[in-house]
Amino acid sequence: MKNNRPQEKTLVLIKPDGVQRSLIGEIIHRYERTGLKLVGLKFFTPSTKLVEQHYLMDKGWLEAVGNKSIASYKKRGKKLPFSDSKKCGLRILETLKKYLSAGPVVAMVWQGNEAVGIVRKITGGTEPLTSDVGTIRGDLTLDSIILADIDGRAVRNLIHASGSSEEANKEIKIWFKPSEIVKYRLVQEEVLYDVDLNGIME
Ligand code: UDP
Ligand code: MG
């Protein structure tokens, strides 16, 4: 194939609610039909230690997730349960440890042009209540930040998807050994990426 541009990889987890809702096939189908290539796949119940390591790898995540929660209260004119974003983030981390280790998850690595952005677009925004229609989180579930907070649990939104290429590379390292990432060619890559597209006509 004429085209050797480096491709991005991204980590996707189907969280325990996605597995329990029998959505594994539906979710994989949505990523697969974009043309992205599946290069890693495993199915197991993660430990709380792995979940904590996963979320704490990005130094700014605690504060960012806290701010996300605070913003959703402000937008709806509701009284804030926490005003300190880091404290709010730490509370969310505890709920996430329980959520993600509650049962088996599907861990996947997808590869292709702009894999991180393509996957985030299909996955949709964090809160299912406000995720766009047509996205996995927008179409297939119904949780909200406020309901999750009332019940003292994490927002159940079916998927984790890496937020940036840098985040993806770090996350992939903790979920997969290098030997578990499969290097292979998909026939359709000729059509997606070959610069000439001249192998079609007989
Ligand atoms: N989360 C939560 N409450 C919040 C914000 C996030 O329970 O107010 C959970 C939710 O499951 C989310 C995860 O924390 O998927 C990680 O948050 P992040 O901001 O990284 O969202 P994502 O990248 O998953 O969209
Ligand atoms: Mg995130």
Image (cartoon, grey):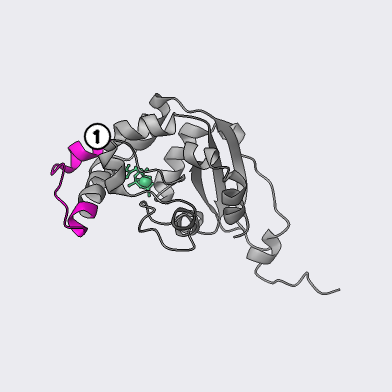
Depth check: give the residue in front, 173 or 84: 84
Q: Which residue is mark 1?
A: 90
Q: Quadrant of the N terminus?
A: bottom right
Q: Amino acid at mark 1?
A: Leu
- Residue drawn at x 45%, y 51% is 141
* For residue 129, side relative to residue 91 (left or right): right
- Toward the right, the furthest residue is 202
Magenta region: which residues? 72-91
* For residue 184, side relative to residue 11 (left or right): right
- Residue drawn at x 16%, y 42% is 81
Asked if the stretch drawn in magenta spans residue 89, the answer is: yes
Q: Quadrant of residue 42?
A: top right
Q: Position of residue 49 (x, y in %)?
A: 39, 25
Depth check: give the residue in front, 23 or 66: 23
Residue count near mark 1 (Cα–Cα under 10 Å), binned few <14, some 14–19, many ≥20? some
The answer to whether residue 143 is seen in the rendering is yes
- Residue drawn at x 39%, y 53% is 128
**Ligand number 1: quarter of image:** top left
Asked if the stretch drawn in magenta spans residue 178, the answer is: no
Q: Position of residue 45 (x, y in %)?
A: 51, 28
Is 49 located above or below residue 100 in the figure? above
Depth check: give the residue in front, 59 or 157: 157
Q: Quadrant of residue 93?
A: top left
* For residue 83, side relative to residue 27 (left or right): left
- Residue drawn at x 21%, y 54% is 71
The answer to whether residue 15 is seen in the rendering is no
Q: Quadrant of the C terminus?
A: bottom right
Total labels: the figure holds 1
- Toward the bottom, the furthest residue is 201
Q: Position of residue 38 (x, y in %)?
A: 62, 47
Q: The residue tagged with tag 1: helix, strand or loop? A: helix
Q: Position of residue 160 (x, y in %)?
A: 44, 44
